[in-house]
Amino acid sequence: MAEAHWGAGDPGSIYDYIRVATFAIGPDGRISQWSERAAEFFGVPATEAVGADPITTFVPRELWQRGRARLERTLSGEEWVGTTPYRDATGGEGLAELYMMPDSALPTAGATCLAVDLGRLRRIETDLAASEAVFGQTPTGFILFDDRLRLQRVNDSFASGMGLTPADLEGLTPHDLFPVSEADRLTAALRKVLATGEPTFDLRFHGVVPTREGNRLWAVSLYRLNGTAGQPIGVAGQVSDVTSRHVAEREADGVRRNLALLNEASAHIGSTLDLETTAKELLDVVVPPFCDLATVDLYTALLSGETVPSAGRLGDTVLTDGSGELRRVAVSSVVGGASSVLGSVTGLPIAEAGGTLCYPRRSPHARALRTGRSVVPEPGPDPLLRSTLIVPLVARDQVLGLVQLSRAIGSEPFDARDVAIAEELVARAAVCIDNARLYRREHERALILQRSLLPPGNPAASGLEIACRYLPSNNNTEVGGDWFDVIPLPGNRTALVIGDVMGRGLRAAVAMGQLRTAVRTLAMLDLDPAEVLGALDEIARGLGDDSVPAGPPTPYGRLTSTADEEAREVYLATCVYAVFDAVTRRCVFANAGHLPPVLLGPGEPARMLDVPPGLPLGVGGEPFEEVELTLPDGAVLGLYTDGLVESRKHQLDEGLRAFRTALSVEGKGLEDLCDHVLGELNPHHGEDDIALLMAKVHAFPEDAVGNWFLPPEPTSVAKARELACSWLLSRGLEELVDTTELLVSELVTNALKHGRGEIRLRLLRDRSMVCEVWDDGYAQPRQRRAQETDEGGRGLQLVSLLAERWGSRRTPKGKIVWFELAL
């Protein structure tokens, strides 16, 4: 008898996919042989199946009769193929395609049967149909590699994308299709998927297609193909040409990058009114996000406030001939050897930041300056640069200079979009640079105006040694209204003035100049300090008077310009005015809201003088008080503005205390002491202007003063001549005797004629000789033109003709008439 069951074949055959079972039926109509696949198919082991009736065992009861009839015909030699339901050992039912073939070679008739699971077969057919549909009709490329990484099959979409047919591609490897570097990457990915079974998604690689221009970009996802036993048999891939998508993504990234660049420029360019800082801010924005090397060149003429020669117009833009001298105000680079690169680009000697250069007339740089348009020159021989873009700086219809942008080898060259974004960036920077340039010009002019209104050097004063300092604020802040003055007065007296106009800019400097001129004018009237400040207060209020007419009326009110509003703005200022008499060493102070003077007495620490601080000038409404002090010989008087002692870093009291401490140092001359104070207080923060005026008292020599009292008698005229001549001769001033004798006679005669009371004659010798005649009369002398028939009226004309200067001033008890002769 034959074996009870058949042996199993190798796994992974086609029969594992379609689920096939074989068995044999003997001539008695019972199962004679039962394979392992049959046991798996029906779920019945060979020990139970062999010898069993196949009809009653595997066929549903309602089909027994039909099944037995079919079996008998087969055993009688009739072959049959058809479908039949079956039942497995668990009671489950299925549908099988059954092949029953009689075996005529056996001594007794039997049959060999082959059963195929129709459900599995139909599923395989469906999968194959779907696979064919997807493989053949989808626009996505599909590829199949065998286990040797050769193309086994490709669909039409992939083949057409490569410019070939599927037959042309079969058997090829990645190295037959793509550049070596890309083929190596793809091969490595295929081997990894084949070895590990882990899929790879969106692997991108480049290549060239003969039928298409340019480089193509593909994205591939790879999956391992396994046999029924799980063994790898190849790799399947889904391929998409993403060149267009990549270009779109790159363009979108470029747009986003450019928008971010513009946003960065808006936030950072123009944060200050310093020209060099603004240029550097532009380069900080573009290097390295936009380019690798950049420079900013500006016309030196514009920087100095001059006008660049015009070479015509382009629309409203004033063009230049491109040959003017430029100054390189900023350089930025991420390229090694940037200096050599700069030289190779321009073809000129290298110009670092701060250097000057002139571009040749035929150079692309000069062309950009002449035309006011951007230029992209042809790439030069430099091995470090890929592309250069030259953009002119144009603001308010004026070419200011140019910006040069360069990209290094390995970067994309500048395209039209890059040129547009560069022009937008440079246009924004140009406005900021021009604002900084205009501000610098205004600042320098205001500074020149301010300095021109201050005393040059250290002014000379009778009985005083003067040292003064003025430190302007830094370039990032506007000029202030600080000022000081030393005004010589008759009678060897000196007016010391220091003040500070509130506010900044050119208007503050102009207001300072107006007030300083007013102070000098009032000082010449020989008014008391309180009267001077009172008159200054009226003047300050007049400077900001609202009498400036507004514009014409409209339904919405009167039109008012900004200039009118500024003209009506109230001027406020602080000021200290002091008058020092060198003969008596008495000093009279008046204060209009200013910081108090500081006095350093011999052998004493510096102290603040108690001078009542009145209201600032321009407020009005309150009179000013005076304080009179006698200053000891060798004392140092300090007048200053708030910039010296006030800062954001410390309180005002702390600054005043530091000033007194610095002033109290011993053993220094006045100039050195002035420098020591500035060094100790470290006022170089630049927050505000600083004015410092220091005066050291030197006692007037006793032999330099002649003082006599004369009775109101006619004989006093001769006595005055005698006293004056004797005093002059005793001091070796013989050359002044005749003139002095004549003029003293005239003044004493006028005192007898127009004055009253006792007459005082005083002679003072300092840098000149001064003669004073005092009387108790209040009528001020007035020079007039005498007619030919007049018997008098020519005395003051004679005084004016022979004296260097002459004048009169009031005293509490009368007046003083004086004249001055040069030594």
Image (cartoon, rainbow, N blue to C red):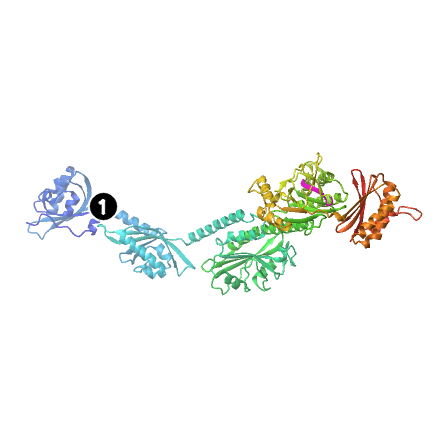
Residue 576 magenta-drawn? yes
Considering depth in this image, is 618 or 40 the residue closer to the camera? 618
Nearest to the observer: residue 303 or residue 597: 597
Horizontally, is 223 left or right of 79 in the view? right
Identity of the amino acid at label 1?
A: Arg
Report the number of numbered marks. Answer: 1
Residue at the farthest right position: 789
The chief SS type of the magenta part is strand
| Front one among 352 and 582 | 582
Q: Position of residue 42 (x, y in %)?
A: 16, 43
- Corner quadrant of residue 208: bottom left
- Residue at 8%, 47% (x, y): give it: 27
Q: Is residue 166 left or right of residue 608?
A: left
Q: Residue at x 65, y 56 (%)?
A: 307
Q: Can the viewer see residue 334? A: yes
Range covered by the magenta-colored residues: 572-583
Q: Quadrant of residue 313?
A: bottom right
Q: In the displayed image of the protein, which residue is found farthest to the top?
A: 621
* Residue with the mark numbered 1: 120
Q: Is residue 289 magenta?
A: no
- The percent position of residue 250, horizontal first and vertical second, equals 45, 52
Percent position of residue 224, x then y = 28, 52
- Nearest to the observer: residue 519 or residue 619: 519
Q: Secondary structure at mark 1?
A: helix
Label 1 packing within 10 angstroms: few (<14), some (14-19), many (20+): some
